[in-house]
Image: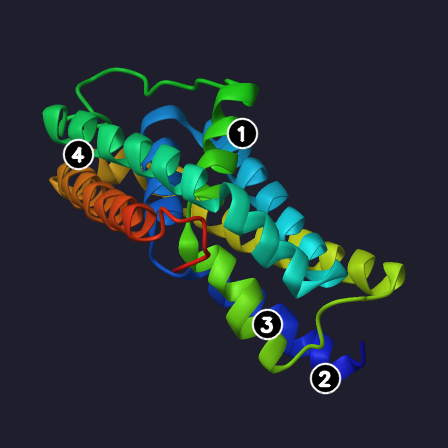
């Protein structure tokens, strides 16, 4: 890959990481409610999944399409069910994270948070579409050399990690002040509604694609 392609790839990864969506909402929610480490472990799981998709796509677009044709529907169903559950729990506890004279939780469940990041990213059709429909417009995927794949993995880890780090640091540094206002309630409500809407979309997509084909 030449310098121009690497630059465009890095910018596209940054856009992928900062775009609004369920992962962003979960990062903010975890940072407010559970602290930096819990949110960071979540992003680690999400990044591992992005790297997995990139590696499979780098070996061959057809391979990723075939893989998602076999298990994509099940990922969507599982992801949809979990997002709907998160939406329900969020609406039933909109006060979560609001400061009431107590210390905010600092949970650091590595496996739980990483697993959640993996599950939500596996079930996110936007991430899948990114490597099947967007990346190939400026990068030749399929049959990438090992060096190119490792370079791409490094860019994903560096750029994605930096974007997540800045977001989580901003939220955790500001959470004391933010938790004294209605901001947390609004974040919880918007996040819960977002989870429900995206979960419903994933479920609809899975039902429409029940024959095993790949669909966004």
- Inter-mark Cα distance, 1 to 3: 25 Å
Q: Residues within 10 Å of mark 2 (few under 14, many from 20)?
A: few
Q: Secondary structure at mark 2?
A: helix
Pick whichever of labels 1 and 2 is earlier in the sequence.
2
The label shown at residue 180 is 4
Q: Residue at x 44, y 17 (%)?
A: 107
Q: Secondary structure at mark 3?
A: helix
Can residue 7 be seen here? The reply is yes
Q: Position of residue 39 (x, y in %)?
A: 46, 34
Q: Secondary structure at mark 4?
A: loop
- Left or right of 61: which side holds 154? right
Closer to the observer: label 4 or label 1? 1
Check disc 2 and report the residue beneath it: 4
Q: Residues within 10 Å of mark 1 (few under 14, many from 20)?
A: many
- Inter-mark Cα distance, 4 to 2: 46 Å
Closer to the observer: label 2 or label 3? 3
Residue 165 or residue 177, whichever sits in front = 165
- Inter-mark Cα distance, 4 to 1: 29 Å
Q: Residue at x 56, y 36 (%)?
A: 45
The label shown at residue 114 is 1
Q: Residue at x 63, y 69 (%)?
A: 10
Check disc 3 and report the residue beneath it: 135
Pick whichever of labels 4 and 2 is earlier in the sequence.
2
């Amino acid at each position: 890959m030449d310098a121009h392609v690497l630059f465009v790839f890095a910018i596209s990864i940054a856009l992928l990481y900062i775009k609004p969506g369920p992962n962003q909402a979960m990062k903010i929610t975890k940072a407010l409610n559970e602290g930096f480490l819990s949110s960071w472990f979540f992003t680690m799981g999400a990044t591992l999944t992005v790297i997995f998709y990139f590696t499979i796509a780098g070996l061959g677009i057809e391979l990723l399409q075939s893989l998602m044709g076999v298990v994509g529907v099940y990922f969507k169903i599982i992801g949809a069910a979990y997002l709907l559950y998160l939406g329900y729990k969020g609406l039933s506890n909109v006060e979560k994270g609001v400061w009431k004279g107590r210390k905010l939780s600092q949970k650091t469940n590595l496996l739980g948070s990483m697993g959640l990041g993996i599950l939500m990213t596996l079930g996110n059709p936007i991430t899948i579409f990114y490597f099947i429909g967007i990346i190939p417009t400026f990068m030749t995927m399929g049959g990438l050399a090992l060096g190119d794949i490792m370079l791409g993995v490094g860019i994903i880890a560096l750029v994605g990690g930096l974007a997540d780090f800045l977001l989580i640091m901003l939220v955790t540094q500001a959470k004391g002040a933010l938790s004294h206002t209605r901001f947390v309630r609004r974040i919880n409500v918007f996040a819960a509604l977002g989870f429900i809407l995206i979960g419903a979309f994933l479920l609809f997509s899975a039902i429409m694609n029940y024959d095993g084909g790949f669909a966004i």
